[in-house]
Image (spheres, helix red, strand yellow):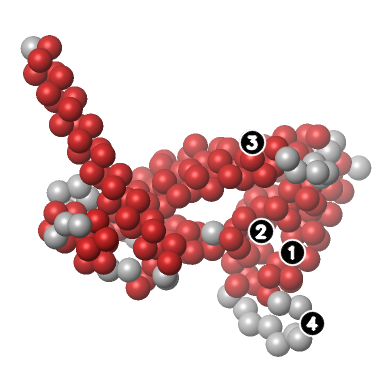
Amino acid sequence: MAMHMKFTDMRDQERLSRKNIIIDSALKLYSRQPFRDVRLTDIAKATGVVPATLYNYFPSYEILMMEVVAKKMALVGKEFKRIVATMRPKTIETFSIKYVQLLLKYEHTYQMLSYIMVREGLKKEISERLEPTNSLFFDLCSDVLSRNGSCGDIQLLSRSLIGALNGIVITFRNNTFNEKDNSVDDYIILAAQNIAFQFGQQSI
């Protein structure tokens, strides 16, 4: 029985390793080109297998994409944790600017996430997979708000601030500007500073 369990564990570990190889190959492809241009055959070729083999590990292309996004977002969360740890000064404004800069840096990942969230039957699953990363963002935000004297329901405030900053990026990315003096990214930073100021007023 013990020997059987060992062989079972080995098979499970081997399967997990192969899944991770596929996910890592897909991650590299998504980082080099728009996700809508990446086909299943491209991922299979990058992995060194035939396309049909991928279905042994992922029931659909969307499930594979979900796994890729979940892994990438976990890495993004860890990166942001390091950014906040060294952030000076630890103000709401600095946090807000750093957060929207992170969104812009990994915009393609957030585009993939938005795509998955509207897919039938995947919203609940991807939400559950991202819960640890989302909680990390909220906790980091709550800590900054508390440090700056925010009172009341800090958890609600942190979710409101993160939601507002997400909305800024989405809104400005969906609009075109003809201004010559500022790029869209500059407007996003300015808008983030304005939102931070409004939330800072909660501390007064």
Residue to which mark 2 is pinned: 101
Q: Is residue 197 left or right of residue 10?
A: right
| Of pointers 2 and 1, the one earlier in the residue sequence | 2
Please tell me whether mark 4 sits on a helix, a strand or a loop: loop
Q: Circles 2 and 1: CB distance less than 8 Å? A: yes
Rate crowding at label 4 as few (under 14), some (14 to 19) or many (20 or more) other CA atoms within 10 Å.
few
Whole-percent x, y for residue 150 in the image: 81, 38
Q: Viewer-proximal residue, 151 or 189?
A: 189
Q: Amino acid at mark 2?
A: Gln
Q: Residues within 10 Å of mark 1 (few under 14, many from 20)?
A: many
Mark identifier at residue 144:
none
Which residue occupies the extreme right position in the image?
A: 204
Q: CA distance from mark 3 to mark 1?
A: 22 Å
User: Dot 1 corresponds to which residue?
Assistant: 189
Q: Is residue 40 visible?
A: no
Residue that mark 4 sits on: 181
At x 14%, y 25%, the residue is 8
- Amino acid type of disc 1? Ile
